Image (cartoon, grey):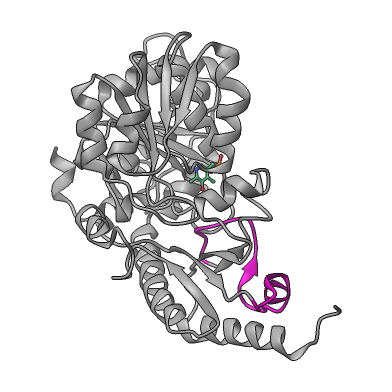
Amino acid sequence: MSHSKKGLNTICTHEGALEDTLYKGATSPLYMSSSYAFEDVDVKRYPRYFNTPNQEALSKKLAALEHAEAALVFGSGMAAISTAFMAFLKAGDHIVFQQTLYGGTYNFVVTHLERYGISYSFTDGWSVDSFENAIQSNTKVIYLETPSNPLLTITDLHGVANLARNKNILTMIDNTFASPINQNPIDFGIDIVLHSATKYMGGHSDICAGAVASSQENIDKLYQTAICFGGSLSDYTVWLLERSIKTMGLRVKAQNENALKMAEYLESNPDVERVNYPGLKTHPEHELAKSQMHGFGGMLSFELKEEINVSLFFKNLQLIRPSMSLAGLESTMISPVKTSHALMSPEDREKQGIRDSLVRFSLGIEDFGDLVKDIENAISKTKSVSLPV
Ligand SMILES: *Cc1c(COP(=O)(O)O)cnc(C)c1O
């Protein structure tokens, strides 16, 4: 592939850009038309056909970023994910999901798949064996997330891809947490890469979008379903997303650095019980992460010591925002037990190791010292008040 020779930041900045032949402007012109001529043209263009000039331009950039032959841009991460399920599964098929799934995906799986006659199983872990054990004779797709949410476990991309390929099973990965800057699953034999572009690709907490990258053959197949479900992205947002991605390499690098420093700092903090971050040598899959990631990402999670009141800790944060969103320029924290995993039973949460004291931390690009000050201040405030008994 010719684009694989270009550096990452060059791809982010230039790949797929539309040329302004009329005025020689620096940025891609924005074509907002929802109506294009049908006579004497090669392509019938229409926003829901994913083929306006700006949609096609951004798709090229996304494909290059994921070392894929082709890509499609969607209106949200869930539009990309649900369309992929509908395109590659049919009644009678079975799909294997990794035990820990993004909440929206989990919700789609448990509320919709059976209605379409598609059965599913969850793995009981994230080892290659746990995937193999969940496979049935009618399994058509294996679906994984690595690093996982919120415990940052690492799944062996090469191992799962090989297992699936030998059995003619398609592999799909939600690569949102890593971003294409830190992980390119296609290089390890994974077939279909899904993204919530709302996260690292957008990066400024102001865009909702999604993406799928794969072989041309798979994207052609996906396309037939995608134009029926209609989950395309408006050209204005496509244009904004192109602009955001130009700085993705720089942003994610800064977030990786903040996250690694933060993980090391938290590990040495006496008020912290444990830290989950694939970049730490103490992480059980650290070596695996090193072998399949270019960077360890901007997400981590940690448990506060039992005596610290987590709600009070959140209330006393001043810089870091207690917010559902992740991957933006600004640092955010959430309590998975109260948000993303609130619907899961306490027993299931305990089984997966998601405790009440767990905090998920999305590192932004702020100065590291200011983030540490904010955490230390919030922890100290939880100690200076006596709680009603
Ligand atoms: C946010 C997110 C999604 C869903 O994306 P939307 O853009 O909100 O539809 C899917 N997977 C992961 C890992 C996410 O963080």
- Quadrant occupied by the C terminus: bottom right
- The residue lying at 54 percent from left, 57 percent from top is 326
Residue 288, above or below 233: below
Place residue 167 in its image quadrant: top left
Place residue 194 in its image quadrant: top left
- The residue lying at 63 percent from left, 25 percent from top is 111
- The residue lying at 44 percent from left, 25 percent from top is 84
Q: Is residue 139 visible?
A: yes
Magenta segment: does it hold 309? yes
Look at the image and give the residue range highlighted in magenta: 307-329
User: Which percent across, then down, holds residue 261?
Assistant: 38, 78
Residue 320, above or below 224: below
Place residue 386 in its image quadrant: bottom right
User: Which percent across, then down, holds residue 306?
Assistant: 62, 74
Q: Nearer the viewer, residue 173 or 9?
A: 173
Q: Nearer the viewer, residue 116 or 82?
A: 116
Residue 308, above or below 39: below
User: Which percent across, then down, holds residue 191?
Assistant: 28, 30
Magenta segment: does it hold 142? no
Q: Is residue 360 left or right of residue 253?
A: right
Examine the residues drawn in magenta and state their main secondary structure: loop
Residue 21, above or below 89: below
Q: Is residue 321 left or right of residue 386?
A: left
Q: Is residue 235 visible?
A: no
Q: Residue furthest bottom?
A: 384
User: Which percent across, then down, holds residue 250?
Assistant: 35, 65
Q: Nearer the viewer, residue 273 or 334?
A: 273
